[in-house]
Amino acid sequence: MYNVLLVDDEPFITEGLVDILDWASFDLQVVGSAQDGEEALQMLQRMDVHLLVTDISMPVMTGLQLIRRVRQFQPGLKVIILSGFNEFDYLKEGMQLGIENYLLKPINIEELESTLNNVTEKLNRAEREEKFDALGAQIIRDNILHRWLTGDISQTEFAERTQLLGISIDLPKLGVLMVRTVEDNFTLAQQVEQSLRDERFCTVFRDLDGDVAIIVSLHEHEHPQRLLHIANHVVHTFQDEELRIGIGTIGCKAQHGSTSRSEAKKALEYALVDPHRKVFEYTPAATSAETETVGTLKASLNREYARLILARDQQQLKEQINKDFAELSQAEGMTPSELQNIALGICSDFRVVLREVKREEDGDLFLQMIERIRSASYREELLEAIQYAAEETIALLSRDTRSPVVQQVLGHVAAHYGEELSLKMLGAQYHIHPVYLGQLFHKEIGETFTDYLNKYRIERAKEKLRTTSEKVQDISRSVGYWETGYFYKQFRKYVGISPTEYKTLQ
């Protein structure tokens, strides 16, 4: 809603204008009226007004004098002149001052309404352009900072770009915090930045993964607990928001940004298995022996655990876990706390495997697994908790509750998402009524077939935009959208920005 100020030395004119027009239908509201230019000028200096409707001939200060004065501090104000004088000089000067229209009294209501429509459209267009310019600048800023923290830009180029964008990261050391929310919140970066306005040397942006990064610059001997202080401040500020914060280590500015970001991301992974905590500090291995042993375990997990889970080989998986933890318990400097953290990480990986294969999980069951691991006091109890997690993961993987026809539909979408697909066509292919198929699909997958298909196509489009140099129009067709405009609409709906903007960020 845009604000309007009415100015005329005859009150019945302003009162009549308020009554005779449905201002709200033009997205306008009258916020005040004045009887001369001087009074109006004072009101304009303290009020937020978008449109001025003023008479020309008034005592103290004329309408033209008022317009000239207000242009000095509000050059974009829209103005409509009302006049009882059909004189070319008045019209000429009004046009030079940038008015929207010069209307003669008695006022032609249809002409006034037409003018108001045009004014509202201009105000809407200006607002859209301002938002687009702000979004474009934000995307460029986020892209530069993301490239810097991922080592994808030289220090020279980064220094040039930050100077141009007014970004200051000048202190000798830095650490990175990563903030992640359960639900997507596209305004979280701006909200976090606002909450840290009293914290010096904090640079906030949204990275390409959708997380919010906080780069904290520090003096040479500044206490490292400052990162934890900032994390706790954000948690307290957004206590009603389901968010988690990972904290990387502190190091020299030029070399450490990418490392600290990676550490903060790794710390965030524990949020998957420990829902009671909100802040996770990255802790590097204390000794070379620990590093080597833990590294061996992770490699073993990557090579063997996932394979054994997918093969449903419960006995072999049990033996592998026993072997790994026997080695870990004898590692130099290994503590019960570290063993527990490793067990939580294994549980997290079990969960990831299940999610990737079935695209679903039993959240309550995994919470039980986590609680057993966290409450274990002895190595034997810890091993029992991990074995329980392994057994239940394999059981969940083996239990496929989806009907055969829904499994066939999912497979068909994966193989033919670039083609024309509909419930009617799939119903005919699998000999089932399309209405019933739609209901069955929604019940088992948790969303409509159309939503699932659009999300699947948009994910494939994102992959192509990231990894190929194909034109957006070609990518649109390759994932099943023959109308590029509709593709843009769906992409913006699920990603938040257009395909072109997304491609420029890669």
Image: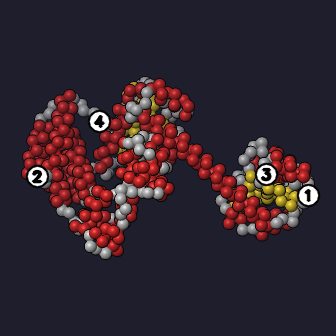
Q: What amino acid is found at the position of numbered circle 4 in the picture? A: Thr
- Closer-to-camera residue (157/462): 462
Residue identified by numbered label 3 = 99
Residue identified by numbered label 2 = 313
Q: What amino acid is found at the position of numbered circle 2 in the picture? A: Asp
Find numbered disc 3 in the image and state the secondary structure of the residue it sits on.
loop
- Closer-to-camera residue (480/286): 480
Whether label 4 touches label 3, CB < 8 Å: no
* Residue at the image position 24 percent from the left and 66 percent from the top: 402
Q: What amino acid is found at the position of numbered circle 3 in the picture? A: Ile
Q: Earlier in the sequence, mark 1 or mark 4?
A: 1
Residue identified by numbered label 4 = 283
Q: CA distance from mark 4 to mark 3?
A: 65 Å
Residue 96 pos. (x, y %): 82, 46
Q: CA distance from mark 1 to mark 2?
A: 94 Å
Say above or below: 365 vs 170. Answer: below
Between tags 1 and 4, which lies in front? 1
Answer few, some or many: residues within 10 Å of disc 3's Cα (few below 14, many 20 plus, some between 14 and 19).
some
Q: Earlier in the sequence, mark 1 or mark 2?
A: 1
- Closer-to-camera residue (287/401): 401
Give the quarter of the figure containing the C terminus: top left
Q: Earlier in the sequence, mark 3 or mark 1?
A: 1
Answer few, some or many: residues within 10 Å of disc 4's Cα (few below 14, many 20 plus, some between 14 and 19).
few
Whether label 2 touches label 4, CB < 8 Å: no
